[in-house]
């Protein structure tokens, strides 16, 4: 999931009363909820290195064991540097438990989307996918933002910051062409509801409200997992294929009722758009895998090793060029031949050896 969702999750948990158990608890929750994403540093080494390292070690057992201890050490150092006589003492036992709990929410949320997470790195490189919640989900933002908004100051600076956040969050909802109009309307209704909620902050029990927000978020996630399972079964029944061959029923942006369903066939992938509530499926399209010696040579090119380990449904398109062959590789879960995220290109010489490569 995106950093906003992770951070708001930490804040919402804190507002249930956890943040009051010891000083610096909210800091441990907010930072700990994002802690496994320290692997974003791999992005500086290039796109292939990023795909090779992201959602790996720092999201696995060793990372989840060690990173919270590093966080506790940093918070201890911060208190030593900034503490004043008379400050409430920190209960480091409780703070450690809070840091571990916050860090554990991170891979659980990451598992929910189609990007996946390697839950047992470095002991196993296998990817796990919940295929339930889009990597940026505006409805979780709305549900989890409430506790943070209620606890914010009512000053002019706070109002400006929250207004700016609302505008920035609304931009993709409005501009992404495949977000349905009904979702845009519901989004702005939700934003308006948060504004009214903030005006009523003095009359609301913040602990109960935060607890309710966490329960609603968990219920929404459960509903999305249910939708994924139903969509898979619906397509298996319509196409008369084994359920195991329906390899993904992925969420789409801002529309909880739709799934992009992919079925593995011997020579490619069948794709349907499904409304899992109504049980309606679009006509089936087909994406061939595109096997052949050139595809096989491109797949083992060292320069895209990280991409190929991450790719879930790679397909290949081979084209001749002036100096050899160009092989475009696209992961079907991220759409058609757009050349955008989820794709790579390898150029081969006339003997099938990699000349250069690019990961998008």
Image (cartoon, helix red, strand yellow):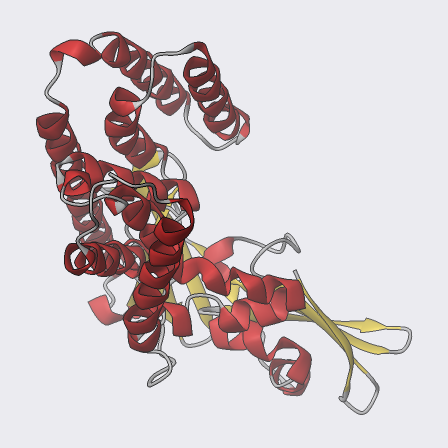
Residue projecting furthest to the front: 85
Classify residue 84 as left or right of residue 42: left
Q: Is residue 208 above or below residue 292?
A: above
Pick whichever, 62 or 60, lies toward us.
62
Determine the image quadrant of residue 15: top left
From where the camera sits, is residue 64 visible? yes
Quadrant of the rendered image containing residue 136: top left
Q: Is residue 109 left or right of residue 335?
A: left
- Residue at 33% across / 72% down in the picture? 66
- Residue 60 occupies which quadrant of the picture? bottom left
Q: Nearer the viewer, residue 308 or 41?
A: 41
Q: Position of residue 323 (x, y in %)?
A: 90, 78
Residue 262 seen in render: no
Work out whether residue 183 or residue 269 is closer to the camera in this orientation and state it.
Answer: 183
**Image spot of residue 98 (x, y percent):** 20, 54
Q: Quadrant of the C terminus?
A: bottom right
Q: Position of residue 23 (x, y in %)?
A: 23, 43
* Number of marks in picture: 0
Taking 61 as reference, is 180 above or below it? above
Q: Residue at x 53, y 30 (%)?
A: 177
**Residue 243: where, in percent of width, then height?**
21, 66
The relative height of residue 269 versus residue 251 in the rendered view (above or below) is below
**Residue at 29% from the left image edge and 36% from the top image edge:** 140
- Is 348 above or below relative to 97? below
Q: Residue furthest right?
A: 322
């Amino acid at each position: 999931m995106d950093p906003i969702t992770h951070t708001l999750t930490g804040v919402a948990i804190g507002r249930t009363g956890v943040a009051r158990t010891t000083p610096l608890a909210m800091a441990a929750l907010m930072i700990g909820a994002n802690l496994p994403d320290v692997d974003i540093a791999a992005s500086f080494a290039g796109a292939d290195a990023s795909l090779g390292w992201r959602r790996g070690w720092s999201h696995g057992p060793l990372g989840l064991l060690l990173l919270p201890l590093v966080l506790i050490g940093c918070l201890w150092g911060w208190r030593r540097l900034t503490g004043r006589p008379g400050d409430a003492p920190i209960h480091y036992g409780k703070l450690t438990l809070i840091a571990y709990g916050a860090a554990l929410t991170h891979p659980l949320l990451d598992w929910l989307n189609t990007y996946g997470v390697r839950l047992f790195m470095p002991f196993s490189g296998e990817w796990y996918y919940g295929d339930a919640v889009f990597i940026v989900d505006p409805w979780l933002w709305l549900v989890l933002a409430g506790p943070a908004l209620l606890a914010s100051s009512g000053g002019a600076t706070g109002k400006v910051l929250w207004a700016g956040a609302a505008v920035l969050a609304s931009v993709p909802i409005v501009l992404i062409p495949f977000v349905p109009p009904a979702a845009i309307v519901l989004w702005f209704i939700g934003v308006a509801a948060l504004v009214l909620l903030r005006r009523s902050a003095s009359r609301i029990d913040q602990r109960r409200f935060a607890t309710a927000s966490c329960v609603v978020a968990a219920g929404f996630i459960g509903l999305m997992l249910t939708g994924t399972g139903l969509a898979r079964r619906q397509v298996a029944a319509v196409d008369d294929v084994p359920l195991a061959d329906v390899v993904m029923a992925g969420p789409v942006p801002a529309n909880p009722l739709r799934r992009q369903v992919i079925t593995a066939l011997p020579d490619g992938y069948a794709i349907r758009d499904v409304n899992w509530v109504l049980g309606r499926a679009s006509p089936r399209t087909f994406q061939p895998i595109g096997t052949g010696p050139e595809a096989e040579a491109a797949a083992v090119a060292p320069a895209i090793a990280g991409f190929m380990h991450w790719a879930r449904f790679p397909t290949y398109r081979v084209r001749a060029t002036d100096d050899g062959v160009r092989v475009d590789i696209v992961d079907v879960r991220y759409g058609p031949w757009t050349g955008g995220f989820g794709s790579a290109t390898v150029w081969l010489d006339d003997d099938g050896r990699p000349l250069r490569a690019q990961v998008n």
